[in-house]
Each structure stands twice: as structure tokens, then as C-alpha cells.
Image: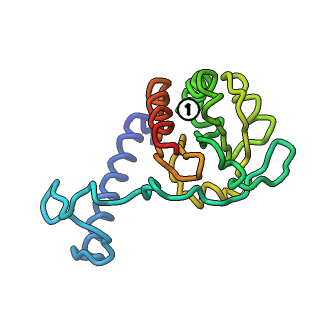
Amino acid sequence: MNISRPRLLIGSLSVALVLGVAGGLAWAQLTGDDDEGVDASLDEPGVVDREVSSIETIPSLSGDRLPDATVSDREGASISTASFVGQPLVINFWFSTCVPCAKELVDFAEVDAEVGDDVRFIGINPFDSVPIMERFAGERGVTYDLFRDDDVEFQQALEIAFFPYTLFVTSDGTIVEQTGVLDADGLREKVANLLENDT
């Protein structure tokens, strides 16, 4: 018996379709139509029973003290974040495979060159090795201090859930503001606000 390939293919697909539909119907009958095991459902399509804006994702740190955590310098020596306190700080969390981080580092280097005498810029990297961190930042013009958050202790203390993430901290260690991605103009504005709030 000689069956052409197109007929064999169409026949196989038809059988697979029939078996798929029959299997789906059997599964529906076995499992029923109840909502057991459903974690959440909407009462009406498109209607959420509470304000979406009331769902917190990251706690506001404004007014909190900079947490004391341990990071490491390029030689691997342990550094307490408490040692950063004493002048206004811009602390930026980033890593090399984060696309917005890469774009933002150029702007941070630019603004650091303008206001670096008044504000200390610090880069915190939880993922990259020291050579990758330094090369990547250096290629984008960064000359300010870079530290590794090897055990993500600092990141966890701040409950950071996205990157890039930047803190603005007064010289007494009070967090004024936290942000996500910034361009150079946005960063200048945040730095001006930080200096206004610094006592």
C-alpha cells in the first residue's frame, strides 16, 4: 500500500487533534468546574476589589537611617556602610548585565564630575566580579568608589527588588529619597534636593 506523505501528515494531524479534544473533555469532566485551588479571581472582568496603588512593592525609606551592612572593596576587605556616613551620598546599585544600569552609569559619571566635591557617589554591585565591575564602570566614565555586596547583605537590608536602584542620603545618614532609573537631568534634580535637605 502506497500512501503519499501529504495524506499521511494530514491523517496524523487529524488523529492528534481528535485525541487532544477528547483528552481535554475528559480532563474537564474529571476535574469539574469548581474553583478549588484557585488563589485569586475577579468578581467582574477588569474590576479589582481594592486600590492597586495600595499594594506595596518596596517600602519607602524616606526618613530612615542608612542600614549598617558589610560590603567589600576591590581588595576584598570588609567595609561597613556606616563608614560612608559623614557627607551627602548618592548610592547606586547596579550590575553589568542590567541594560538600564549601563545607560544610567554614563549619566552618573557625568553628574559626579560636576558635583563630586559636594556629594560622594558610591556604586554597589552585588553580582559582578571586581575586574568586570571596574572595567564595565570605567568604560562608562565612572571614577567614583565601587564596592561589592558579595552576600547581598546591603541589598537585603534595603529590600531592593529592582535595578538600578539609587539612595540619596544626608551627611547624618538619613535617607532622603530612593529611585529607580535616572537620566542626568533627573539626577541633578535629586542631588539638588539632597543638598537642600542636608543639615
Residue 125: quarter of image: top right
Q: Position of residue 163 (x, y in %)?
A: 54, 43
Residue in the picture at 61% in, 34% down: 119
In the image, residue 97 above or below residue 75: above
So how many labels did they put on this image?
Answer: 1
Q: Which SS class for mark 1?
A: helix
Q: Position of residue 188 (x, y in %)?
A: 48, 27
In the image, residue 146 above or below residue 183: below
In the image, residue 30 above or below residue 158: below
- Choose between 97 and 158: the one closer to the eye: 158
Q: How is the image coloured?
A: rainbow
Residue in the picture at 61% in, 59% down: 67
| Residue at the far left in the pictured view | 44
Residue 94: quarter of image: top right
Q: Position of residue 85 (x, y in %)?
A: 65, 49
The answer to whether residue 165 shows anywhere in this view is no
Q: Position of residue 74 (x, y in %)?
A: 82, 42
Quadrant position of the N terminus in the picture: top left
Residue in the picture at 35% in, 41% down: 10
Q: Residue 57 vs residue 41: left or right?
A: right
Residue 186: quarter of image: top left
| Amino acid under disc 1 | Val
- Choose between 30 and 34: the one closer to the eye: 34
The answer to whether residue 8 shows anywhere in this view is yes
Crowdedness near tag 1: few (<14), some (14–19) or many (≥20) residues, C-alpha within 10 Å:
few
Which residue matches tag 1? 99
Residue in the picture at 73% in, 25% down: 138
In the image, residue 27 above or below residue 195: below
